[in-house]
Amino acid sequence: MIGNISRTTRSFHVPWAVLPRPSRSVIFDLPVFAFGLALLYSFVIIAHYWSGPLTPRVAIDLSPRALPVYTFYSVLRIFVAYLLSLAFTLIYGYIAAYNPRAERFMVPLLDILQSIPVLSFLPGVMLAMVALFPRRQLGVELGAILLIFTGQVWNMAFSFYSSLKSIPTEMREAARLYRFNWWQAFTQMELPYSVIGLVWNSMMSVAGGWFFLMACEMFVLGKRDFRLPGLGSYLQTAASAGNGKAITWGLLTMVVVIVLTDQLVWRPLIAWAQKFKFENVEAVDVPRSPVLTFLRHSRILSALSNKTTAPLGEALALHFARRHDQSKPPARGSAIRVWFVRILGIAAAGVVGYALVKSVVLIAGLGVSGLKSILLGAAATFLRVNVALLIGAIWTIPVGVAIGTHPKLARVAQPLAQIAASVPATALFPLVLLALIHVGGGLGIGSILLLLLGTQWYILFNVIAGATAIPADLQEVCHIFGFSRIERWRKLILPAIFPYLLTGLVTASGGAWNASIVAEYFHLQGKIFSTTGLGALISHATDDGNSQLLLTATIAMALVVVTVNRLLWRRLYRLASTRYRLG
Amino acid sequence: MTSSPNQFQTLVSQQRWREASTLLAALPEPSAADLLTGLPDEQQLSLFRALPIPLAAALLSRLPYYDQYILLHARPVDEMRRVLDEMDPNERMRFFDELPEEAWQRLVDEIGELQPQGPATDQTEAAPAVRLRQRAPTAEAQQPIIEARGLEKSFLQPDGRKVQVVAPLDLSIYPDTIIALLGASGCGKSTLLRMLTGLAQPSSGLVLWHGRQVGETAPNVAIVFQSFALFPWLTVQENVEAPLLARGVASDERRRRAVAAIETVGLKGFEAAYPKELSGGMRQRVGFARALVVEPEVLFMDEPFSALDVLTAESLRGELLELWQARKIKTSAVFIVTHNIEEAVLLADRVIVLGRHPAKIRADFRIVLPQPRDHKSPQFLLYVDFIYKVMTQPEADVTLPTLTEPQQKAYPLLPHAMPGGIAGLLELLADSGGEEDLYHLAERLRMEVDDLLPITDAAALLGFAELKGGDARLTERGKGFAEADIATRKRLFRQASVEHILLFQQIVSTLSAKSDHSIPIELFRDILDEHFPKNEVERQLEIALDWGRYSQLFTYDPETERLVQSQEITSPAEPQPADTSS
């Protein structure tokens, strides 16, 4: 019988044998080398700038020549914030997945944190950082980075946590049975299993970073006006000055950077991550990236990895394995450990309790008129968010279904839509606002448009995905029985895209609530445009340094978002997964 | 005297076998034999296993050959011979006379096995050119590798009740044997395997590896999983190396051993491939290589072939046996969990059959056919038939109380069968004259026993069929059902389910008591929660809904999550002419 198998081997199509061997061309290596040099140079520059004295208020130069440096600073901020998010994600997700006691409060906490807008973190984060490094630029920089971090991290942490929770039992058992230590389990099972979810969520997170860049790089905190050199502050300064040319330049730069990131970072990452897909058959249509192919063929990189990462990985793995092998099963519940955990728990409870009492006192001091304005604001924003969702759904459903069911149209429309969606709506706000003011509209209506700009894409892309997934035979059934157009929509299309539409709406709703802080309150041409709303209240409170109002408004927003999630979206989800599931 | 049958029942239902056997010993033999055969089969086997040998022999003498044969196999092989020795010579003669030819042949083989100069052993030594593994020596000769004592697993429900999955059982695994653990799916086989390997903690009892508790030592085991459980992002080579890396084996040594293991399973040349580039059979070979590379003392396999197609499974099984017999794998015992009877008889030296709810040992015997085995030989078929009979003995009405709360009756379990399947079975039975051997039935349907069993169980539970010693017989009602049209069938099914099934009685009476004839399904989920583990509860509800829909007793509204009484019942005049909604 063994002979049998080797016979099949010979006639078997062996994909890895026909792959091109790594190319030996030097041309491939030149760009890699150049890139290394550039990286080194930027390290030096950054170190010099960050350790420099504090200049909280940089004059922003509006000439296009200043843009490369500003862009560099912004990209670096987003990058560092992303690294922080990743580290946080791994630790938070790991603890939440493996410590049942911690899980019980860590997961709902994520839900709440996700619903808190970035600006609400601003005063605390910023003041703490400035206090930590009072004389160095580093403090303000770290503050801005942490702000971007708060906008990026939550969905990543959630994704990692749920990946860990969904690792198949038998795979976990194999790891336990074959005595994997935590390091090996992490590198060979947990991380690979979570990679795909992490990559997609990283893309979303970084896009979110761009979205809130303007808010994070330039803001007023009480009497202090903070400005950091960067693309976000450039755009905002240009908007304040009403300088259309500068806005266009800034916008253009941003689009270029985002498209480049997509091509140079995300596409290769997605193509690489296919390796980690948990599937049993090889997919036919695999995402590819020329950049990845290029990197894989680079001689310097492969030599470098052979000399550095590969031996390092081996040494680490062996180190952990040998330590694990010697260690006895842990003596459970040693008294010191138990006490340590207890004391830690009591301390944490104390801090939380103190903060709770303080905030209650603070909120109580707000008075009836303050509460009234918050309620009014919440109602206004609620209305605005849902009107924006409605308008978004009304135009994206027909368009998305058309794109999803007509492959020819999809080939043209989908890349265009992707580029359009990649431009952060915040960057477009000034242009849109200028136009609105020109035709004489106010921010009350305008902010709906702004929310729509930011969130319609989530709905569109999900509808397209849903429409693509409608099985051809069901379409044929409709055709054979001569369903009218209305009947077809009611009986097939709407039910079929419902789960996807729902995903789009949920994401869009969350995004819209968060975006309301920038959509309802805007600096333009030296004036502040604002309208009634919870987002405007939060932005305003941040500007004024009114922590009382800020805290209450933030709690109100978190409360509304979490409640809507629980009462509406979760139920609809259940309906979607029971009744409207295809296949 | 009059109270003794009752007392006996109580003792048996509390599984106090020793006291029950003392009681039997005090009775006159004919009544003792009657009492024994009056028990549900399962308890019969357990009790018989506990009887002292003279009493066992005496009682056995009074039974028909069929019961004799089955009961005899409740005991270990060495005891079988002693029981036979103790029997009244005339009765023993009668037994041998009445026993069918093949059964007798096999029995003789089994007993002959114990004698050092038996014909069977001669055969093995003469046959092979390669040095074959010795057939498993007798149990007494060796120390067990693994010994399980009073092993038990139960889950705690949220409301504090215990659901028992594995009843307390003793089990020893000796070197040089392939053991097959057989049982219908979901009977707790996998749980048992995981407790033996130390992957799962028993609720009580001990697992000893060479006399040391499994938590204290890390036993050198490997499992071949049903789903392969390979890491899709690692190449074949890396997958096989992973367990070695975990043991801190350095790179070169790791590579060498992995390559050797990959070659052993016939995957040479595929080292750099990823699992998803391989076929199912080749992937399971990687699973084998990964298991063999650590040179486990006991190789565990959890339904290793059931995810593969029939031909692939067959060739893999053959290779496994070849490797084992030629001692190419350095493993002193193999423990394979399966639901496939033929697979067990093909591979194993010893077969253990588990009963369900909770799992307990129904039979534990040795297979003394020489390898390679011919699955068409009469002896082979006899084993298959025997296991079928053990597995198909009706359990549905076994009112075995759980050990933790002896007074509480087990909640009857709905067999995992669809009304359509039940109807199909009854038609088939009617076609073959109302009675058929279950094994033949399964063969005609090309079904595995654990696909067929739930259907026959369901038919029996509804009173449409009777199961007796491996045969299924149509009852009058079942005959009526098989001959009826759809509307009548639904009515009959409705009557039968309300008459025989506790859950249906509860549902129907609650529904008719309510003014709006509907009730949240949560209520019944709560009721079932007290008796079954979580996923079984969902299964039970699904089955109940299926049956309810078919019989038009009630339907389920997913939006309100309520059970709703069907129209037909609220106006019980005439069964509606049913459309083809089933």
Image: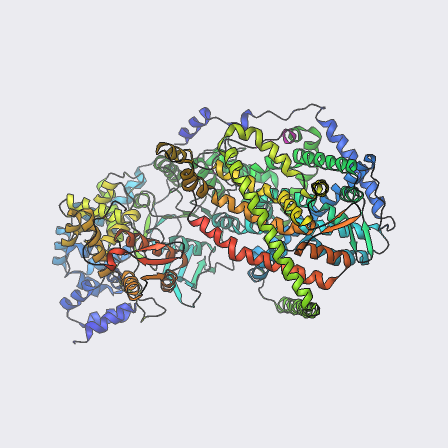
Tell me where residue B380 sits by quadrant.
top left
Of B19 and B154, nearer the camera is B154
Tell whether position A119 is magenta: no
Query: Relative to the observer, which residue lies in front, B312 or A409?
Result: A409
> Between residues A505 and A346, which one lies in front from this camera angle?
A505
Residue B297 visible in rendering: no
Image colouring: rainbow
Query: Is A122 located above or below residue B376 in the figure?
Result: below
- Seen in the image, is B476 located left or right of residue A579? left
Q: Is residue A20 left or right of residue B268?
A: right
Q: How far across and how far down the image is residue B400, in percent? A: 29, 64
Count of marks placed on residues: 0
Q: Main secondary structure of the magenta part?
A: loop
Q: Residue shown at 28%/60% (left/top)?
A: B504
Residue B389 pos. (x, y %): 23, 51
Quarter that holds the N terminus of chain A: top left
Residue B409's image quarter?
bottom left
B339, above or below A408, in the image: below
Q: Seen from this angle, which residue lies furthest front?
A: A440
Please state the extent of the stretch shown in magenta in the rendering: A280-293
Image quadrant holding the C terminus of chain A, namely top left
Q: Estimate the x, y position of residue B325 in percent, counting from the top left.
A: 38, 40
Q: Does residue B505 appear to the left or right of B436 in the view shown?
A: right
Q: Can you see residue B62?
A: yes
**Residue A46's x, y, as percent?**
81, 43
Q: Is residue A286 magenta?
A: yes
Location of residue B566 with respect to A495 vertically, above or below = below
